[in-house]
Amino acid sequence: MSEVKTKAEKARTAAAVLNKLTTSQKNEALQLMADSLRSQQDDIISANKEDLERGKAQGTSSSLLDRLALGPERIEAIAEGLEQIIALPDPIGDVLETFERPNGLQVTKARVPLGVIGIIYEARPNVTVDAAGLCLKAGNAVVLRGGSSALSSNRKIVEVLRSALQNSALPADAIQLIESADRSSVDEMLKLNGLLDVIIPRGGQSLIRNVVENATVPVIETGAGICHTYIDETADPAMAEAIAINAKVQRPSVCNSMETLIVNSRFAASHLGHLADQFRKSGVEIRGCAETLKLVPWAVPAQEQDFATEYNDYILNVKLVDTLDKALDHISRFSTKHSECIVTENAAHAERFLQEVDAAAVYHNASTRFTDGFEFGFGAEIGISTQKLHARGPMGLPALTSTKYIIHGSGQIRG
Amino acid sequence: MSEVKTKAEKARTAAAVLNKLTTSQKNEALQLMADSLRSQQDDIISANKEDLERGKAQGTSSSLLDRLALGPERIEAIAEGLEQIIALPDPIGDVLETFERPNGLQVTKARVPLGVIGIIYEARPNVTVDAAGLCLKAGNAVVLRGGSSALSSNRKIVEVLRSALQNSALPADAIQLIESADRSSVDEMLKLNGLLDVIIPRGGQSLIRNVVENATVPVIETGAGICHTYIDETADPAMAEAIAINAKVQRPSVCNSMETLIVNSRFAASHLGHLADQFRKSGVEIRGCAETLKLVPWAVPAQEQDFATEYNDYILNVKLVDTLDKALDHISRFSTKHSECIVTENAAHAERFLQEVDAAAVYHNASTRFTDGFEFGFGAEIGISTQKLHARGPMGLPALTSTKYIIHGSGQIRG
């Protein structure tokens, strides 16, 4: 049997055990995992060095190498991440509904684990621990398939985590790492209906597209964010500037950062010049529509395709509009339905925007950068769902659960 | 542009309008639809005759022709179904969570429509109306693709429904019927990411398998039910018999009926002979394991594959076990995770069964036939989900919604 199928079957068997564990049994296991990461940090760092050296030899960019690197501080932060998961309430067993039918049947809808979760991700080895911790806390076994550039790190980390579980009530088989670097191991995971209950891809667009297009296992799509900020005619200029700069510049590489700024043309007439200068000072290239170029002559002319591009970089599209309707039309056309913002002092405009824009998170007078599990107070997140089924927006522990109807009867039969 | 894409785009445009409508606007439209079905029943019945005649000429079985047939009573029942949907609470706008963050952000999680729902189904033309009514009430546009055997009926029904919408606040384009009988129209729907938000297949196993295996649009899987009833050693014999007979015989053709009866061997020693006789009187063929055959010599020997078969017919597998664990093992191996029942007077056994069996609905001392939106009091159902994402078990209106985070700020930016 293939590595993928063998390990998925072990995870499935482990999931049946996990389903029966108490919150404190799960928390004890998570603490053992955190302790082992700390006590074995030297082994992890030396495994990580192998990845870094291989990466350097292959000419990997320094920014990617930085994301891959593990030192004592990062390992401590990862261990603390597990302790944050311990502190989160256990969603399993929560009763979501309970009702009695006229025939006396007592129906309870309760949260149960999903079962076995597949995570397909790229470079950063901290995801290995975060994802495993969150899945286990919600009573799920996990099959991890990280990027080959982090394989030595991931192998050592999973070895440490699994051996920590030996001293816990959790089966070590609850954490599985697919070690094959071959792309076919991903393809095989995507079709493992019956063994995997869901696959969550975390990574760049091509990784996510491959998963969405080829999986027969249900998928929770995460990630892509072409986020807009619309500055309305009545926006407070200082607030609008602070929000727009923050949405673009505070961390351009992430999905909830802004790609396109839409500006009401009357607001723009007074304020766009100054605002554009602030972006320039922050090192942001502006690609503007024809109207923008009249006010910001140094901007690069925007092509149609630019408005459909997630730069994740110091590049910003700027588009002027006459009316709220035109802003809504532009967003409806180009949005990836992640996070969208209106800055306005006009309550009716705010209300329309929040109601009509179809996105996981819609903001009035706040930066789109807040779309994040930690910022929402979920304590942790497994990703940000950009689909509409099951979970939408930042996903905390409840997104890693399903439900079950439990029915108590006294001999009822259907007439 | 293809029929499928053209109609899906019209549905997408209509969905943006639907998203803004009030409950009473939607209910008025549903009432107009019900009224039109009644006033134009003669046209519908004559369109239905075309389907029936074509079916007869093609040698369609009488049971399928019966499912296809529409008379005044069935049309009245379909119209009443729409009125039942009017009576249901509108889930859109329901606030599921609301919290304030330390930085003052006000976060609300509210129910919103999914957007555009694709329904792929088989013969019965009542699904055309039920599905459209439920989707519209939850604020969604719908793209219907029914079986070619009901095409004339569906075409007339959709014409009637769409012309009813002309007099309402709902755009007629909110209801689309794919008329191409070509299988490629299904294939095209399955890949319409961005235009369809979800596809719900309703029909037999091969229809559902095709959708699950080929869709890139998210799917809610419905249907397959290999349901078990386990009679424990301490079961009340009269209750066990009533439940087992009901689960098999009351309507064998549906997904929540029983396919396999598991019996504790000590209970079987005293009671299986009588129980088997009752099944025989009801016209049920028994396929038994080796131990069963000792007690029921007239039973047919069960093959391994029988336990993995959804008969939807008057055929029942019977398997004897020594222990609850063996019953749980058998269920874990063959269950499609739909509905599972234990009949027992032993509370600890009941508790273990309800906790450990992984299924959408788990029963203690009641027939599995109750897994149904109407029986659960949901007023209607779009299907019974057998997957773990988004919705599990009978799906009422809330299963046809998504959520959105609405964030009110006062200039917050991320530090």
Image (spheres, coloured by chain):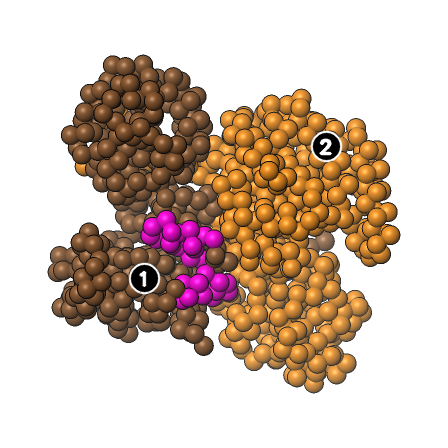
Chain colours: A orange, B brown
Q: Nearer the viewer, residue A194 or A77?
A: A194
Disc marking residue A159: 2
Q: Position of residue A30 (x, y in %)?
A: 65, 30
User: What amino acid type is highlighted by mark number 2?
Assistant: Glu
Does the magenta segment cover residue B209? yes
Residue B400 occupies quadrant: bottom left
For residue B195, above or below residue A199: below
Task: Estimate how packed mark 2 is, as few (under 14), some (14 to 19) or many (20 or more) residues with alpha carbons within 10 Å.
Answer: some
Residue A123 seen in the current view: yes
Q: Position of residue B399 (x, y in %)?
A: 40, 50
Which residue is at 39% across, 64% downward?
A: B183
Q: Using residue A319 as the reference point, say whether residue A390 is left or right of it.
A: left
Q: Which residues are magenta?
A: B184-213
The residue identified by callout 1 is B146
For residue B363, above or below residue B130: above
Q: Are marks 1 and 2 on the same chain?
A: no
